[in-house]
Amino acid sequence: MPDSPEPTTTGEVGDAIASTGPSGPAMSYEAARAELEDVVHRLEAGGVTLEQSLALWERGEELARACQALLDGARARLHAADTDRAAATPPRPA
C-alpha cells in the first residue's frame, strides 16, 4: 500500500508542477528528479487503476520536461560562463 493516496485525475497528480510556472517558485532539478523516480517506481509496481496510471504517466512526462529544461538551462549557463571567460582571457604570446 503506498504512503500517499493514489491520484485519481491528472489535475491531482499535476498540482505540484503547476507551482513551477511563472506564477510560482520553480521546482529544483533534484526535487523534480526525485519525484520522477517515485512516479516510475509507482508505475512499475502496478496495483493502480488505469486512470491512476495515466495520471502518473502524464505527471512523469511533465517532470521529465521540467528536468530537461533545467539541464538545458544549466548547460546554457556553463556555455555563457565559458564564453565570458574566454573573452576576458588575453591571448597567450606565441
Image (cartoon, rainbow, N blue to C red):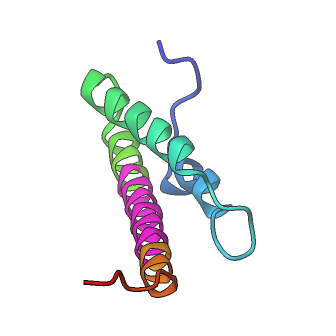
Examine the structure image and report whether residue 69 is included in the region drawn in magenta: yes
Image x and y of residue 6, in percent: 51, 32
Above or below — where is 27 with respect to 18?
A: above
- Could you say which is closer to the camera, residue 31 or residue 13? 31
Which residue occupies 46% across, 64% down?
74
Above or below — where is 18 with respect to 90?
A: above
Image x and y of residue 64, in percent: 37, 55
Image x and y of residue 23, in percent: 75, 74
Please state, as top left, top right, bottom left or bottom right, where the C terminus lies in the image.
bottom left
Examine the structure image and report whether residue 70 is included in the region drawn in magenta: yes
User: Taken as a whole, is the magenta stretch helix, strand or loop?
Assistant: helix
Q: Classify residue 4 by image quadrant.
A: top right
Q: Classify residue 52 by image quadrant.
A: top left
Residue 75 relative to residue 24: left or right: left
Which residue occupies 54% across, 55% down?
14
Residues in magenta, as a range = 60-79
Image x and y of residue 44, in percent: 25, 27
